[in-house]
């Protein structure tokens, strides 16, 4: 092993990295296809996204140390301490998601789950298609359109959270003088002496 390799820590495993960048591409494709009313394409991109997210949920229990949800569940005290320390410029370094980032990751994953769920319900109760078709006779027209509106609205909330996510990535990179975007590409982070 070269000195350079020895000074690096493998943080993001291949499945997490593939998940992340496929999610980014899928989100853009889903958004653009809906805006352009290419609904056939939208639904196929949607199915791919559902599969990706389900895989990530399983990987959250079976992946490497940093991929596991357990590794980035923090107490409110830890999260507050982290956020307060940001102002002093001495926030604790984490190889995996920091407490503020982790909060955003869980918010994004939960929101995506809700967007995809409402998309699948909409597909069943308005277009009479897809794996949830059995719901079609259970739901009134009013409720059906409620699901469609919820799908649309939650996408708008995602469009607010995503820039905040990017802001968090930039500020975390500056705070700890490391390139978090590159780490999500290569999987590697520089070894930090104060952390094991
Ligand atoms: C991040 C992923 C997604 C984004 C950004 C997204 C975005 C949107 C948007 C903006 C619309 C509204 C289009 C309009 O009427 O103006 C829409 C509609 C729709 N979406 Fe999604 N969607 C996503 C995932 C899904 C998934 C996973 C499914 C199901 C497989 C799905 C199924 C549908 C359906 C069926 C409609 C049409 C509703 C209608 O008939 O008017 N979407 N989506
Ligand atoms: C070009 C745009 C984007 C960049 C540069 C970016 C960058 C990153 C980085 C660097 C991380 C790791 C954060 C850390 O070190 O703690 C991350 C995690 C994450 N990002 Fe993004 N992101 C982008 C767009 C998105 C979008 C559009 C979504 C959702 C639709 C998203 C959802 C997530 C999720 C769920 C994680 C957690 C990954 C995991 O643990 O599986 N990102 N992102």
Image (cartoon, rainbow, N blue to C red):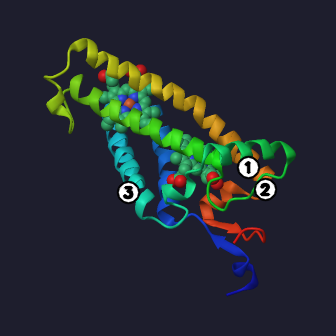
The part of the image, by quadrant, that contains residue 185 is bottom right
Quadrant (top left, top right, bottom left, bottom right) of the N terminus: bottom right
Q: Which mark is residue 77?
A: none
The percent position of residue 146, horizontal first and vertical second, equals: 33, 17
Quadrant assignment for the C terminus: bottom right
Determine whether, in the image, residue 195 is placed left or right of residue 122: right
Residue 33 falls in image quadrant:
top left
The residue sitting at 51% across, 60% down in the picture is: 67
Please tell me how crowded label 1 is: few (under 14), some (14-19), or many (20+) other residues with Cα within 10 Å.
many
Kindly tell me whether mark 1's CB lies below 8 Å from ligand 2.
yes
Quarter of the displayed picture in which ligand 1 can be seen: top left
Secondary element under disc 2, as helix, strand or loop, is: loop
Q: 10 Å neighbourhood of mark 2: few (<14), some, or many (≥20)?
A: some
From the top left corner, tell me how far across and down residue 123 is, in percent. 26, 29
Q: Estimate the spatial distance between the alpha carbons at disc 2 and disc 1, rounded to whole Å.
A: 6 Å
Residue at image mark 1: 172
**Which residue carries the number 2 mark?**
176
Q: Which mark is residue 58?
A: 3
Q: CA distance from mark 2 to mark 3?
A: 30 Å
170 horizontally vs 120: left or right = right
Q: Residue at x 45, y 39 (%)?
A: 110
Q: Earlier in the sequence, mark 2 or mark 3?
A: 3
Q: Earlier in the sequence, mark 1 or mark 3?
A: 3
Residue 105 or residue 38, whichever sits in front: 105
In this view, 90 is above or below 130: below
Residue 11 x, y percent position in the rendering: 60, 66
**Helix, strand or loop status at disc 3:** helix
- Looking at the rendering, which quadrant does residue 30 occupy? top left
Tell me, yes or no, whether the two marked residues, 2 and 1, touch with CB atoms within 8 Å: yes
Is 96 left or right of 63, judged from the image as shown?
A: right
């Amino acid at each position: 092993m070269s000195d350079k390799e020895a000074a690096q820590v493998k943080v993001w495993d291949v499945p997490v990295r593939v998940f992340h960048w496929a999610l980014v591409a899928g989100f853009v494709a889903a958004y653009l296809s809906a805006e352009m009313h290419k609904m056939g394409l939208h639904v196929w991109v949607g199915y791919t996204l559902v599969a990706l997210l389900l895989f990530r949920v399983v990987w959250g229990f079976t992946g490497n140390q940093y991929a596991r949800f357990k590794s980035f569940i923090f107490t409110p005290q830890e999260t507050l301490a982290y956020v307060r320390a940001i102002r002093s410029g001495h926030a604790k370094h984490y190889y995996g998601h920091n407490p503020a980032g982790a909060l955003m990751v869980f918010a994004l994953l939960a929101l995506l789950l809700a967007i995809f769920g409402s998309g699948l319900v909409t597909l069943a109760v308005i277009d009479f298609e897809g794996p949830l078709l059995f719901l079609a006779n259970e739901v009134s027209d009013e409720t059906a359109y409620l699901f469609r509106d919820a799908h649309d609205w939650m996408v708008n909330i995602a469009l607010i959270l995503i820039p905040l996510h990017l802001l968090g990535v930039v500020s975390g990179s500056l705070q700890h003088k490391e390139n978090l975007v590159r780490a999500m590409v290569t999987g590697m982070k520089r070894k930090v002496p104060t952390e094991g």
